[in-house]
Amino acid sequence: MCRFLWSLFRQNIYFVIGVVLGLGLSLLLTPVVDNDCFFSVHFNNEESRILTSHKDDDYEPRINLAGKPQKAQKTPQTLIRPRYFSTELGIKDKLFIGILTKADTLVEYAVALNKTVAHLVDKIMYFIDAPSAQRLNVSSLRLPGIVGFTDTREILKPFHVLKYIIDNFLEEFDFFFIVKDTTYIRARELYSFVKKVSVSQDVHLGSPAVGQSEFCSLDGGILLSNSVLRKIQSTLDWCVKSAFSDSDSDNIGRCVLHATKIPCQQNIQGQSFYSFHLGNTQITTDNKYLLKDPTFEKAVTYYPIREPSAFYKLHLYLCKVAMMHKKMDIANLRHSLLNMSHFVPGGKKSVSWPVGNQPGNKPSNRFDVLRWDYFTEMHIYLANDFTNIKILSGAEKSDVQYVLNKSISFMEDKYEGQIQYRRLVNGYRKFDPSRGMDYILDLVFRDMTSGKEVHKRIELCKPLGKVELLPMPYVTENTRVNLILPVDASNRKDTVTFIQQYTKVCMEKKDKTFLMLVFFYDPHAPGKGKSDDIFKDIKDTAISLSNRFHKDGNKIAWVSIKVPSASSQYTMVHESLLDFAAADLAVKKLPLESLVLICRTNMEIRQDYLNRVRMNTILQWQVFSPIPFTEMNPSVVYNYELPQPSELDINKNYGHFDPLNSRHISFYAKDYWKARKSMESIIPIVRNDKDILNFIKNQEANITNFALHTVYSMFVRMSNLHVLRGIEPGLRLRYEEKSCQYPETVSGHIAAGIYHSCIASQAFSLGSRSQLAKLILEYQSASSVS
Ligand SMILES: *[C@@H]1O[C@H](CO)[C@@H](O)[C@H](O)[C@H]1NC(C)=O
Ligand SMILES: *[C@@H]1O[C@H](CO)[C@@H](O)[C@H](O)[C@H]1NC(C)=O
Ligand SMILES: *[C@@H]1O[C@H](CO)[C@@H](O)[C@H](O)[C@H]1NC(C)=O
Ligand SMILES: *[C@@H]1O[C@H](CO)[C@@H](O)[C@H](O)[C@H]1NC(C)=O
């Protein structure tokens, strides 16, 4: 029974709204009670008397200290800003269209209007009386908004519409256009018309009604601004009482005029609004006859439409006309641009090629000249500072192929098959960040008629695409960052420095953080809980700091892990995967929605880095792996002229951004587990110390495993999250001595991979090229002297 009632209600939702509105309006229609006396004014004679008696006193200023200082009566309120600036600034959508429709026209006319208008404006709604709506079963029509009014008096329908709009949409739109359903609307023109009208202007606009130049014709459509509707709001009952005319146009016009004192205008802010009266004209797809009328093409609305198909015919015809105009505009623009590029005083080309694209970067001095890379079909030469020649592969190869294919087909078309492609001689490409990729290709063709080889040079440009804004989830700088710091016996000293910095930057400043130390114990070192625990002093510091700052919720905790002793079972490969052990055991202790940041003892802690981590890490969306600025070998870089600074500055003489280092990463615990579980079969999850030995079950570990050997590569390969990687000036690392041992005991790609990446990062962190060159020169001159 209940369900039946509910479905009945749902089917007739507009009907119900109509009933409610009808009731509301009928209240309006009851005679308004005499309301002369809502407020009474009461003069307080007591007070005025006291004031005057003061005047008579001998005036002697006295300071009244009783009960002072007083507290402020009201504490100043904090301004609560809305989430969107459009709310705060009152920015609205532009155009609402209200269509007055009837039982006999709804099904065909309103649907035709919907098809020719609805997708071009912000909102469209149809208004009908409720009994017809029910009879026609409007819910089966799939029209975006039909409102049925229970009050069936035709004469009052426009006012029901006005009231409905005022009650529901006043805050959402700048302009309201009300029209009958027998009118075709050129929605694009109407929209661009209202876009040019200032929202601060009162607008009552349309084409004059027959015989009443002060009122607008409802057949042609009436445009009202938000401000005008606000004024009508308070006079709606007057309007209803004064609606005596047979013509809806007159009734509405009188109402607007009464509320705003503005008669119907046809021109506003330099624009004119025209409606075209079709009379008895038959609409055909060429409309030759209509074109002769000069107002036909200027009009925004056309009425009366006598048959539904006329909507579509008119629409088709007007769209064709509009398209013709656009094509002519484009042709004219092209023409004028070409003229400009040819006839410029001084003969210089002022227009860039391709027309309409960015002209590209003009170097201000010789250091800014962008580089052209030379390529052939197989190789690219001197693509960066570190390589001489590189085999073209992957995306670069298909890019070259694509450009080549394009040039060949262009030339073959141009010479109408008279030439045949032979080979590529030279290729050059240049990337300009302000423009895109430019290419120059020297191609050899065979001339089919003479049989000789001809050389052709071709210039191509691949312009940058349009910038796109990607909507991203909301993040705040108020999230707690959980730092995980792996510590082993060799970096105990750095850890002390780290904790000191952490205290200063995070704990004392009450930044929302939590530090989790992960201690790696050597198999023979005195273990957990022993009195000669090698990490005892660090643990003591952690406890005392936690006690000192526990009120702010900032804490230091730790996890201890005993590493197995080196053997054929525990190798350097296992060791290289210890980050997983640290993360598995530490993240397990945190709730799923924690933001986790893996840190290293040689980093400098900075507030701006932590904030960037908060902004760049997004739950179930993005993980963040910063490229750190890394100090180079101090014994190479620093000397008496350039002493080691106490804080690492970003300067090419001290260090470099190290793209090989992907060991700093932040993520949400939930995302970590999801990715981690999906690679459990390759590297099992560590639940206790002994699981470390299981890291690689298969000693014939292969290159696939190497590709997964860091937490970073796990996210890249095993999750569908976006991995944000970029240089991060807030993350600065002190130089760290690395010893790279060639793997003798273990074989396999993974060990070799670890070794080679270790060597590479060591080599790139030695010093800048000029510093190293200087050392070599010094060495050579010293050895030649001796
Ligand atoms: C009316 O227009 C809207 C928006 O373009 C569309 O979603 C809807 O399907 C249309 N309805 C009909 C009956 O054409
Ligand atoms: C109204 O249309 C709906 C959906 O097409 C249909 O299920 C329902 O039976 C119709 N009702 C009447 C009274 O025609
Ligand atoms: C270029 O053309 C060759 C031969 O027609 C074709 O095999 C290749 O797929 C094309 N490459 C691209 C990137 O279009
Ligand atoms: C390499 O690793 C993949 C992924 O774990 C595995 O499927 C494959 O069997 C391994 N190959 C060898 C030779 O171990």
Image: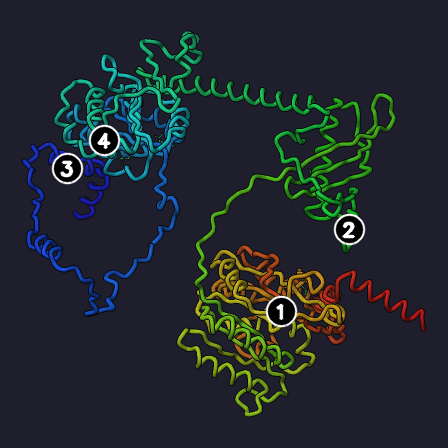
In this view of the protein, which residue sits in the foreground, 9 or 630?
Answer: 630
**Residue 428 percent coordinates (x, y):** 76, 40
| Front one among 241 and 123 | 241
Q: Which residue is nearer to you in this view: 544 or 71?
A: 71
Q: Quadrant of residue 288?
A: top left
* Residue furthest out toward the front: 58
- Label located before the other in sequence (3 or 2): 3
Mark 3 = which residue?
24
Element assignment for label 3? helix
Callout 3, which amino acid? Answer: Gly
Residues at circles 3 and 2 in contact by the CB criterion of under 8 Å: no
Q: 10 Å neighbourhood of mark 1: few (<14), some, or many (≥20)?
A: few
Mark found first going from the N terminus, 1 or 4: 4
Assess whether mark 4 and mark 2 are in contact (beta carbons under 8 angstroms): no
The CB of the residue at mark 4 lies under 8 Å from ligand 1: no
Relative side of 89 to 642, left or right: left
Residue count near mark 4 (Cα–Cα under 10 Å), binned few <14, some 14–19, many ≥20: some
Q: Which residue is mark 1?
A: 647
Identify which amino acid the numbered label 4 is placed on. Leu
**Left or right for 782, reference 73:** right
Question: Which numbered disc, 3 or 1, marks the residue closer to the eye?
Answer: 1
Q: Residue tagged by mark 4?
A: 162
Res. 390 mark:
2
Check residue 361 in the rendering and tell me which mark sits there, or answer none: none
Amino acid carrying label 2: it is Lys
Residue 729 position within the rendered picture, expressed as x and y whole percent measured from the top left: 60, 60
Question: Which quadrant would residue 86 be assigned to in this image?
Answer: top left
Q: Secondary structure at mark 2?
A: strand
When the figure is inspected, residue 295 is found, relative to residue 638, above or below; the finding is above
Q: Residue at x 62, y 66 (%)?
A: 732
Between the residue at mark 3 and the residue at mark 2, the CA separation in whole angstroms equals 79 Å
Q: Residues within 10 Å of mark 2 (few under 14, many from 20)?
A: some
